[in-house]
Amino acid sequence: MTSFSSAEMVNDKQPNDDKEMGSSPRGQKRKRTSREGAGDTKKLIEVLDRNSKMLTTQLEAQNINCQLDRDQRKDQANSLLGVLNKLADALGRIADKL
């Protein structure tokens, strides 16, 4: 059995890792031309704009749904309060008769 130290194993892997990452032999990144960068930037802006509009639409829909839910809960609470008031009045009249 051959034993390797961890430093030797790391040193052995580093050159292979650079090749796998797709870097150039010198370890420098390939520069984009201005045409490639402009096209990518324009696409990125379009995607971000579209996502922003979709998020705005979704938030508006959620706000509307939350408002409707609050209104519905308020109506239900008012109805329940009205029923409880009538019940309390009826119990009060029964208690007065006894």
Image: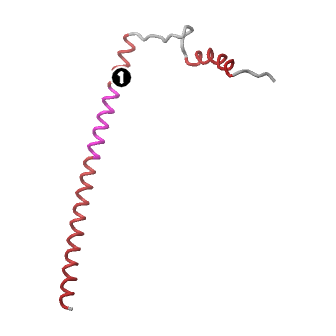
Residue located 40% across and 9% down the image: 33
Task: Name the quadrant containing residue 56.
Answer: top left
Closer to the camera, 2 or 72? 2
Residue type at mark 1: give it. Answer: Lys
| 42 shown above or below 79 | above
Residue pointed to by mark 1: 43
Q: Residue at x 33, y 28 (%)?
A: 48
Q: Percent position (x, y) of residue 82?
A: 20, 71
Residue farthest along the right direction in this orientation: 1
Residue furthest toward the bottom?
Answer: 98
Residue that lies at the very extreme toward the top in this rendered image = 26
SS class, disc 1: helix
Q: Which residue is drawn at 20% across and 82% down?
A: 90
Point out the image quarter for the C terminus: bottom left
Residue at 50% in and 10% down: 28
Bounds of the magenta span? 46-62
The answer to whether 8 appears left or right of 24 in the picture is: right
Q: Is residue 3 magenta?
A: no
Q: Nearer the viewer, residue 9 or 25?
A: 9
Instruction: Decide if residue 68 is on the left or right side of residue 40.
Output: left
Q: In this view, does 96 lie above or below 75?
A: below
Name the main secondary structure of what is drawn in magenta.
helix
